[in-house]
Amino acid sequence: MDYVLRRGGEIAAIEVKSVDADSVSGMHEFCRKYPQAKTYLVGGHGVPIEKTLTISATDLL
């Protein structure tokens, strides 16, 4: 995980990948430990970085 956001009992994890990176093993491990967390994959095969930059951190939780 590259970023973890927490507000009260809410958790969101953000994994940022380059265009050609596919491994999300860190995200899988995080989800195992925190199954209630929302997760986001940015870049690579996930949400485009440009779109992510327009979203407020509070909206991710």
Image: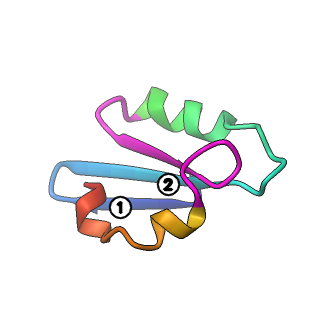
Residue marked by disc 1: 5
Q: Quadrant of the C terminus?
A: bottom left
Residue 26 lies, with reference to residue 33, above or below; the image says: below
Residue marked by disc 2: 14
> x, y (%) of residue 58?
24, 66
Residue 50 lies, with reference to residue 36, above or below; the image says: below
Helix, strand or loop status at disc 1: strand
What predominant SS class does the magenta segment belong to?
loop
Q: Are marks 1 and 2 in contact (CB under 8 Å)?
A: yes
Q: Amino acid at mark 1?
A: Leu
Residue 57 shown left or right of residue 19 in the figure: left
Range of residues picked out in magenta: 34-48
Tell me which numbered mark, 1 or 2, is placed earlier along the sequence. 1
Which residue, as the protein is rendered here, is positioned at the far left?
8
Helix, strand or loop status at disc 2: strand
Residue 55 shown left or right of residue 10 in the figure: right
